Amino acid sequence: MIRVASVPSSHAYVRHLQPVVGDSARAASADPSFIVLPDPAPVRIDVPGQWWPPRLLDARWLAEQTDVHFDVLHVHFGFETFAPDELTRSVDHLRAHRQPLVLTVHDLHNPHFADSAAHLRQLDVLVRAAAAVITLTAGAAAWIHDRWGVEATVVDHPHVVPLERMALPRPASDSFVIGVHAKNLRSNMDPLAVMDAVVEAARSLPDATVRLDIDEDVFDSSSHRYSPTVGAKLLDYTSFPDVDVRVHERFDDDALWDYLSSIDVSVLPYRFGTHSGWLEACRDLGTSVVASDCGFYADQARVHSFRMGIDSFDPATLVAAVLASHADRTPAVDVGVRAEQRQRIAATHAAIYSAVTKEMR
């Protein structure tokens, strides 16, 4: 059994890299060839389940451990808190202890930072040190090859919504709801830019309404997400009769699945980014996706694209994409297909872990 220290392990994406066990899997395996170890507790815990900043990327902490034993370190997220020289010390420690590094490149442009320079310097260290690199799309793999000369293995994004929740039918509806979720105004999101075009598209459809959701953190002066100016401008849409504006606490998973099932299309107003778990959750629940053409969202799955980047936005293409999503609805991915996909993903990871540990012997 290969012991994998994953950064992190307590994340839906990482959990869904592991084989499905139970009746929901047609090709279930109760005897996986690898096990993912739990996340070490961070120095300070501010919220339940916190795994960040990850101790497993702290070379000093690694050197002090006598009871942490793993065969492979697999990095997904969380390295943005480490400077390149710190990451270099960590990968040097791994190399000295013959513990291979596997890296999944989820983000070529960190969605939390408009300037990608620091993120790329961190990837410069990790990609070059990795015994195996994984990414989610052919477009991202080509980008990785162009910058680092490294061949990345492309592995599809697994399901995000639990399989048992996916199996439930969507609620019946006789309207077409276009969702724009501002969330907490993460750096790569610009919902304010797209709202007028979304409203224009809705008004050209006979059965359409717009739902605009905003996390209450945007209006909380004690939150680091406090953005009163943008928040106030978004609230102005309450005066539009065909826009339903809702401010609420951040959705937990069950509330998020209910929300995505209640809208027909989700508009992703991203100015930069690479891949999207939100997109996959929409696929799981039969919600169409309208996404900007930055990153590799259209490589990841079938979406209706519009032109938007860090310094650009074409509203006409957004209107056209929303209209296309109305004419061409996206069915939910079959739960059996997702279960079988997950088995293949688990088998691919098991093969990669086996290969890199053999190389270290």
Image (cartoon, rainbow, N blue to C red):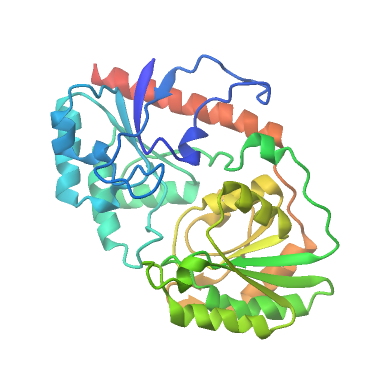
Can residue 301 be seen in the rendering of this structure?
A: no
Q: What residue is drawn where x is 83% and y is 54%?
A: 172
Q: What residue is drawn where x is 26% and y is 36%?
A: 56
Of the pair 191 and 67, the residue shown nearer to us = 67
Question: What is the tally of numbered marks visible in this picture?
Answer: 0
Choose top left, top right, bottom left or bottom right for residue 121: bottom left
x, y percent for residue 308? 52, 72
Q: What residue is drawn where x is 69% and y is 48%?
A: 285
Quadrant containing the C terminus in the rendered view: top left
Choose top left, top right, bottom left or bottom right for residue 359: top left
Q: Is residue 278 above or below residue 317?
A: above
For residue 258, side relative to residue 293 (left or right)? right
Q: What residue is drawn where x is 51% and y is 67%?
A: 216
x, y percent for residue 246? 62, 70
x, y percent for residue 24? 68, 26
Can residue 39 be seen in the rendering of this structure?
A: yes
Choose top left, top right, bottom left or bottom right for residue 57: top left
For residue 76, side relative to residue 63 (left or right)? right
Quadrant containing the N terminus in the rendered view: top left
Q: Is residue 216 above or below residue 252?
A: below
For residue 98, side relative to residue 20 (left or right)? left
Q: Is residue 283 above or below residue 30?
A: below
Of the pair 213 and 355, the residue shown nearer to us = 213
For residue 225, side relative to residue 332 (left or right)? left
x, y percent for residue 255? 62, 52
